[in-house]
Image: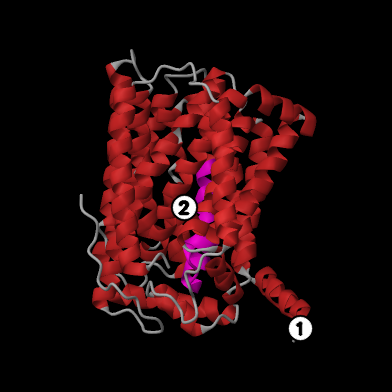
């Protein structure tokens, strides 16, 4: 797989995207969606630790702490906090949207932990990935996506969505054979609720990116919502700050792995944000939901899930996953036409007018370019953030011990190499084409 | 226009935006499901 070729090495501001530029941005968006799938799939692996006695809320809180560290240190390292500040001065209302999206993420993530506990990773994963269906609905209804598209593209997106639904149904049927009925119902509801929350979370995403904001800026405030909400959930479920602290202390030997899972999740999520920005919700989210396949690979090959299951059960899980992936592929190939992109620009103009945002800022963001006055300048604040985040991770690493869970290290190493290759290719493509704007 | 007036202004715009209330309602629903499951 190769990264999209950059259309221009020097992004220019304040000019509408031409057909070649739209194609280049689409290519980057699609590649970001695929890379997001690989990294988001890997990030779910630490939730397996639930099976060795760590409480679901502690798992979720620890992952969110890792997420918080990554969501501040990665943007500080790449763009600098001065760039983030300049972005939010252009559109201060997006702070509210970012915090709200973070709250949605935290609740959804906690629900997924319960879902994994009750029905297993292989089953829960595709169920919460139904979020892409809802995301497509929001994209069409609220942001004019697919408006102006021809019948083939409508058919591709809607047909792909139906395929994904069929795949999810096959996996739901399979879940009834693996767990006690009460657990299966609870797990399936938790996974589907997480899907609704994540599907709705794309509303704030799209609002931000139609306005012209950089994903790097959006996620820094997003994470305040997710850490605040997750802390509130953890304190409530644990019965207070004291009991929560004791649970965290008792789990200190595995906290590093959960923090690392959160860090890996952020890499995937960042690519997903760029996919939403440059390919739209209707294409970007189904592509990033190929994480379902990566989750299946991790579950089966690294953790040995489904070992000893019947051929019928394996058929349901593998068949359902492949049908879902096929649906996602069909959606992804329904590329955005110039007419549809013009509808996106109209939606962006409406957002700009509603919130009194500088039109030059909005149009530059839509074209994957930086508005005049936006600079990548690093200060002591950025380096402090990076050093603190790294130190926290090292401190937890010194306390860590390898979880007592069967892992096939050769498969883990192989998947790691593939993920790093996609990260490098996607990062270079984004830098060359958009300068991470 | 001072900073306080500017802040009130965009907060009012957010609250009047119908799209804002969709995720708010879903978030409340999600918290209720979490309470039931937990």
Q: Residue A150: tell me if it is visible.
A: no
Instruction: Say which element carries label 1.
Output: loop
Write down the quadrant of residue A384 in the picture: bottom right
Percent across and percent down for residue A233 are 69, 39
- Give the residue pinned by disc 2: A134
**In percent of the image, x 38 and y 37: which residue is there?**
A168
As drawn, the label of residue A405 is: none
As drawn, the label of residue B2 is: 1
Write down the quadrant of residue A237 in the picture: top right
Magenta residues span A194-217
From the viewer's perspective, is residue A287 above or below residue A358?
above
Left or right of A364 on screen, residue A19: left
Write down the quadrant of residue A368 in the picture: bottom left
Q: Residue A293: tell me if it is visible.
A: yes
Q: Chain of mark 1?
A: B
Task: Find the residue positioned furthest to the top.
Answer: A308
Left or right of B14 on screen, residue A376: left
């Amino acid at each position: 797989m190769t990264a999209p070729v950059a259309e221009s090495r020097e992004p220019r501001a304040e000019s509408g995207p031409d057909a070649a530029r739209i194609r280049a941005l689409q290519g980057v968006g699609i590649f970001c969606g695929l890379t997001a799938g690989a990294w988001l799939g890997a990030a779910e692996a630490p939730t397996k630790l639930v099976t060795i006695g760590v409480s679901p809320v502690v798992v979720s809180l620890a992952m969110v702490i890792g997420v918080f560290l990554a969501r501040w240190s990665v943007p500080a390292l790449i763009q600098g906090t001065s760039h983030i500040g300049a972005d939010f001065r252009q559109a201060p209302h997006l702070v509210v949207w970012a915090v709200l999206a973070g709250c949605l993420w935290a609740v959804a993530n906690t629900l997924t932990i319960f879902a994994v506990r009750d029905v297993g990773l292989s089953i829960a994963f595709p169920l919460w990935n139904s979020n892409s269906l809802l995301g497509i609905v929001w994209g069409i209804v609220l942001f004019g996506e697919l408006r102006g598209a021809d019948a083939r593209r409508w058919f591709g997106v809607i047909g792909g969505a139906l395929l994904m639904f069929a795949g999810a149904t096959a996996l739901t049927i399979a879940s009834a054979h693996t767990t006690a009925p009460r657990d299966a119902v609870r797990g399936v509801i938790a996974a589907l609720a997480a899907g609704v929350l994540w599907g709705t979370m794309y509303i704030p995403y799209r609002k931000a990116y139609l306005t012209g904001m950089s994903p790097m800026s959006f996620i820094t405030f997003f994470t305040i919502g997710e850490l605040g909400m997750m802390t509130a959930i953890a304190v409530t479920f644990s019965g207070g700050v004291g009991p929560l602290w004791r649970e965290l202390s008792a789990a200190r030997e595995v906290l590093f792995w959960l923090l690392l899972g959160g860090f890996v999740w952020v890499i995937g999520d960042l690519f997903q944000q760029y996919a939403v920005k440059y390919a739209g919700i209707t294409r970007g989210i189904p592509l990033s939901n190929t994480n379902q396949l990566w989750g299946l690979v991790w579950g089966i090959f690294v953790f040995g899930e489904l070992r000893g299951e019947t051929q019928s059960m394996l058929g349901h899980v593998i068949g359902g996953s492949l049908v879902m992936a096929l649906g996602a592929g069909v959606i992804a190939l329904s590329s955005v036409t110039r007419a549809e992109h013009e509808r996106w620009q109209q939606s962006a103009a409406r957002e700009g007018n509603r919130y009194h945002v500088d039109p030059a800022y909005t149009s530059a963001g839509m074209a994957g370019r930086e508005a005049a006055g936006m600079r990548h300048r690093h200060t002591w604040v950025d380096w402090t953030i990076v050093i603190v985040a790294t130190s926290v991770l090292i401190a937890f690493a010194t306390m860590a011990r390898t979880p007592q869970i069967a892992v096939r290290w050769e498969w883990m190493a192989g998947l790691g190499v593939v993920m790093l290759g996609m990260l490098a290719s996607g990062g270079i493509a984004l830098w060359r084409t958009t300068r991470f704007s | 226009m001072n900073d306080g007036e500017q802040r009130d202004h965009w907060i009012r715009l957010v609250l009047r935006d119908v799209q804002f209330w969709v995720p708010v309602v879903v978030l409340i629903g999600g918290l209720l499901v979490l309470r039931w499951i937990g």
